[in-house]
Image (spheres, rainbow, N blue to C red):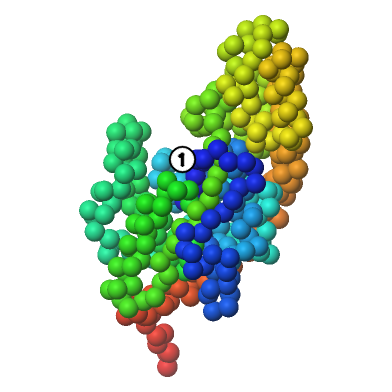
Amino acid sequence: MGLSEKANQPLGTALVEIDSANKGNPEKNNGQKARMMSGMRATGELHIGHYFGALKNWIELQDKYQCYFGVMDWHGMTTAYKTPSDVSQWSKLLYAEFMAWGIDSNKSTLFIQSHVPEHIELFLMFANITPMGWLERVPSWKDSIEEAQQSDTHNLGRFSYPVLQAADIAIYKGMLVPVGADQVAHLELSREIIRRFNKLYKIKLPEPKPLLTETPLVPGLDGRKMSKSYGNFLGLSEPSEQLRKKIMTMPTDPQRVRREDVGDPQKCPVFVYHKLFSTQDDIKWVTEGCQSAKIGCSDCKTCLFDQIESFVSPARLKKAHYLSEPNLLDRLISEGNEKARVEAQKTLSECRLQMGFTHSREVTKA
C-alpha cells in the first residue's frame, strides 16, 4: 500500500498533491491536519528500495499530516499463510525498523494491522457491497493468476486484497494516501468502494485522494528489478561485512576489463547507487576517475560502501536496541495499537449506527 519505486529522482524527493485545493494547506479537516494513511505488507525485512520508495517519504510527511502507518500482517498472510509465525516475527521487525528510521510515535500512529480488529469488521461490511466484477478487473490480480496458482496462493484473501485495503484507509478516515503515479488506479478502486458504502448507508467516510510521491528508481545489485526472490537487494539492516561483500561483488561497466581501461559511469550499476548515497564531490571523483581510469572499480565500490555504511549504521543500531529489549518493544507496539484502536472504534461505531447494527443493551438481573 502506497509503495512506488519509479522515476530516477535525486535523494531529496519531491511530494506533489493531486488535489490542488489542498496544496500547501494540509489543515483541511476542521482546523486539524489532514489524515494520511499508508502501510507495508509484513513479508520480511526491508531493503533500500523500501526506504526510497516509501519510508523516506513517510518520515518527511509526519510534520505535515496526521499520519497513520500500518504493519500490514493480514495482507502478508495472503501469500505466507502456511507460516503465520514468520508473519508475526516479520511484523515486530518492521515495527522496530520503522521506529529506528524515524517514525515518531509523538507525531504519528504506528500499528500492526491484526492487532486492530476493526479493520476486519469494516472489511466485511465493504466486502458485502463490492461487486465481484470490480475485483475481477484489477490488473494486478489478472496478471498474477498463473503465479498465484503455482505458488498455492490463488485464494480469496489475495483476490479481496483491494477491499481490505479500502477498509484499512477508511477505518481511520484517511483523506490522503501516498502513492506512485502507477498506483493511482489502485486507489481509485478504494474510492469507489467507499463511495458506494457512503451512498448505501448515508455515511460520510472520506474518499481518499492520492498524494503523488516522486521516488527514485532503485535497481537491484545486478541491474534487474530489486527483489528478495532474486537475492539482488541491500537490506536496510544488513551487517556491515555482509553489506561490504554484496557491494564489492557488484557487476560494473563491461568496458572496464582491465584496470587501465576507461569506463562510462552511466553504464555501471554501481554508479546508480552513488547518485543515491554519495556526496557531489564523491560523485565527481568517481565520474572523473572512471572516465580517465585513474581509479579502479574496487576504489569506486569501497567509496560506495563507506557512504552506505555511514547512512544505515545509526538506524541499524537503533533497531538492534529495540530488538534487544523485547519488553520495551512490546510496550511500544501495544501503545501504538491502542492509539489506533481509539480512532478505529469511533469510525466503526458510526458505521454500525448508520447501518442499524447497534449492540443490544445488557439486561440487568434482578
267 with respect to 163 (left or right): right
Q: Quadrant of the C terminus?
A: bottom left
Residue beneath the point at 62% across and 7% down: 257
303 with respect to 58 (left or right): right
Q: Nearer the viewer, residue 358 or 29?
A: 29
Residue 79 in the image: x percent, y percent? 41, 41
Q: Is 132 placed above or below 360 here?
A: above
Q: Nearer the viewer, residue 116 or 185?
A: 185
Quadrant in the picture for residue 166: bottom left
Residue 202 in the image: x percent, y percent? 32, 78
Residue highlighted by disc 1: 83
Q: Is residue 265 visible?
A: yes
Q: Is residue 112 visible?
A: no
Residue beneath the point at 68% across and 17% down: 291
Q: Nearer the viewer, residue 331 or 141?
A: 141
Residue 254 in the image: x percent, y percent? 57, 13
For mark 1, give the secondary structure.
loop
Other-residue count near label 1 (Cα within 10 Å), few / some / many at <14 / 14–19 / ≥20: few
Residue beneath the point at 39% across and 85% down: 361
Residue beneath the point at 54% across and 47% down: 214
Q: Is 185 placed above or below 121 here?
A: above
Q: Is 126 placed above or below 300 here?
A: below
140 with respect to 283 (left or right): left
Most extreme residue toward the bottom, as rendered? 366
Quadrant in the picture for residue 164: bottom left
Q: Is 254 placed above or below 68 here?
A: above
Residue 250 in the image: x percent, y percent? 62, 20
Q: Amino acid at mark 1?
A: Thr
